[in-house]
Image (cartoon, rainbow, N blue to C red):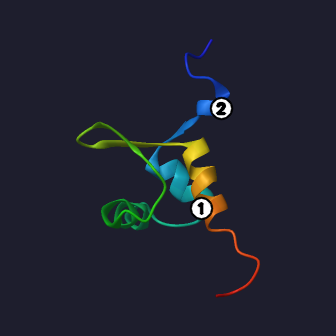
Amino acid sequence: MSMIATDREILTPAQLADELCVTTGHLAQLRFTGQGPRFMKLSPRAVRYRKADVEEWLDDRTKVRTE
């Protein structure tokens, strides 16, 4: 049994990059500029994303027309 509930699913940068069809370098740039989804820093080199935070970030970028 997992200690992490399914609503708190955690993704690695590689997993998220795969889902979004972007590179891990692009995700790193989004982290650096503060434009990407919220992330967790588990250690100096271990970055993780909560799936719920990614969904919220995507929802905030959903548009019905160009601006």
> For this view, does 30 lie left or right of residue 67?
left
Q: Work out whether mark 2 precedes mark 1 in sequence or the reverse, and give the earlier one.
A: 2
Question: Residue reaching furthest top?
Answer: 1
Residue drawn at the location 62% of the way across and 68% of the way down: 61
Task: Find numbered disc 1 in the image and state the secondary structure of the residue it sits on.
Answer: helix
Which numbered marker is on residue 7? 2
Task: Find numbered disc 2 in the image and state the secondary structure of the residue it sits on.
Answer: helix
Give amino acid for label 1: Leu
Residue drawn at the location 57% of the way across and 51% of the way down: 54
Residue annotated with mark 1:
20
Q: Judge depth for marks 2 and 1 and give the one in front.
A: 2
Question: Residue reaching furthest bottom?
Answer: 67
Residue 52 placement (x, y as % from top left): 61, 43
Question: Residue reaching furthest left?
Answer: 44
Vertical arrangement, residue 7 with respect to residue 5, above or below: below
Image quadrant containing the C terminus: bottom right
> For this view, does 66 lie left or right of residue 4?
right
Which numbered marker is on residue 8? none
Of residues 40 and 22, the one nearer the viewer is: 40
Q: CA distance from mark 2 to mark 1?
A: 19 Å
Vertical arrangement, residue 47 with respect to residue 64, above or below: above
Residue 62 placement (x, y as % from top left): 69, 68
> How packed is label 2: few (under 14 Cα within 10 Å), some, or many (20 or more)?
few
Question: Residue reaching furthest right?
Answer: 64
> For this view, does 20 lie left or right of residue 31?
right
Residue 30 placement (x, y as % from top left): 40, 65
Residue drawn at the location 66% of the way across and 59% of the way down: 59
Q: How many marks?
A: 2
Give amino acid for label 2: Asp
Q: Is mark 2 in CB contact (under 8 Å) with mark 1?
A: no
Residue 21 placement (x, y as % from top left): 58, 65
